[in-house]
Image: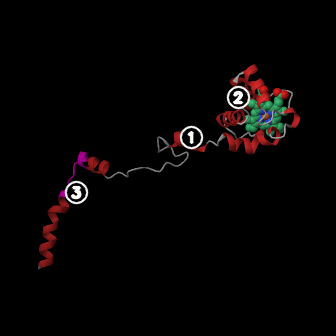
């Protein structure tokens, strides 16, 4: 008997839960949304996903230098301006300007062994700029 009483007592609750209007439902769903969302690279459902991925995926100038530029720029192989050679870098910087140096980093210097992106074809342009910045900073 008692069970039946409880069961009947619950019916109004159950029914009222089902009778939420669309607006109420939306309001509740909005309130119980997760505090933050995990954005996975390339996930279009997440509006910020691509922007975040772009920022966080970029390697630092130092990392790019170590991986792709050091081979020539630490030794001066084939006439590459050496990391730490303040004179060599300041000459190039004052004669050509930073944009030209960035451009050489991305596109290479024709007729020399400075090939496009130092051969790092999966490097983003911004990563190459960062590597150029890094070499300049280390060569003052
Ligand atoms: C295979 C050797 C080699 C590698 C690897 C290399 N460089 Fe160079 N780089 C050179 C040489 C040689 C020069 C000098 C070219 C010249 O005569 O102006 C040079 C010059 C440069 C200059 C100056 C260009 C100018 O216009 O004065 C920049 C900037 C530069 N390299 C950036 C980079 C970056 C960034 C990387 C790595 C992503 C890199 N290099 C990797 C050989 C290399």
Report x, y in % for residue 88: 80, 28
Q: Label 1, secondary structure: give it.
A: helix
Report x, y in % for residue 47: 47, 41
Marks 3 and 2, how far apart at CA: 63 Å
Marks 1 and 3, how far apart at CA: 45 Å
Q: Ligand 1 near label 2 (Cβ, under 8 Å)?
A: yes
Q: Is residue 24 above or below residue 85?
A: below
**Residue found 70% across the figure and 28% down from its top:** 102
**Of the numbered discs in the image, which one, if any, rests on residue 102?**
2
* Image quadrant in which you'd find residue 12: bottom left
Q: Label 3, secondary structure: give it.
A: helix
Query: In the figure, is residue 78 to the left or right of 30?
Result: right
Mark 1 / mark 3, whichever is N-terminal? 3
**Residue found 49% across the figure and 48% down from its top:** 39
Query: In front here: 97 or 67?
Result: 97
Mark 3 / mark 2, whichever is N-terminal? 3
Which residues, given as a range, are shown in magenta?
Answer: 16-24
The residue identified by callout 1 is: 55
Q: Is 21 one of the magenta-colored residues?
A: yes
Q: Is residue 16 above or below residue 95?
A: below
Residue 87 visible in the picture: yes
Residue 115 visible in the picture: no
Q: Are marks 2 and 1 in contact (CB under 8 Å)?
A: no
Q: Is 85 one of the magenta-colored residues?
A: no
The residue identified by callout 3 is: 18
Outermost residue to the top: 95
Quadrant containing the C terminus in the rendered view: top right
Marks 2 and 1, how far apart at CA: 19 Å
Query: In front here: 19 or 59?
Result: 59
Quadrant containing the N terminus in the rendered view: bottom left
* Image quadrant in which you'd find residue 67: top right
């Amino acid at each position: 008997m008692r069970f039946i009483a409880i069961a009947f007592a619950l019916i109004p609750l159950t029914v009222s839960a089902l009778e939420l209007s669309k607006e109420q439902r939306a309001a509740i769903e909005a309130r119980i949304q997760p505090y933050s969302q995990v954005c996975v690279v390339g996930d279009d459902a997440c509006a910020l996903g691509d922007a975040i991925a772009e920022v966080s995926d970029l390697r630092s100038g130092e990392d790019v230098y170590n991986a792709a530029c050091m081979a020539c720029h630490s030794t001066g192989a084939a006439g590459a301006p050496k990391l730490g050679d303040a004179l060599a870098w300041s000459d190039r910087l004052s004669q050509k300007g930073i944009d030209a140096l960035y451009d050489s980093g991305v596109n290479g210097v024709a007729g020399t062994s400075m090939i496009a992106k130092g051969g790092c074809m999966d490097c983003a342009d911004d990563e190459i700029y960062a590597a150029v910045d890094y070499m300049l900073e280390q060569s003052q």
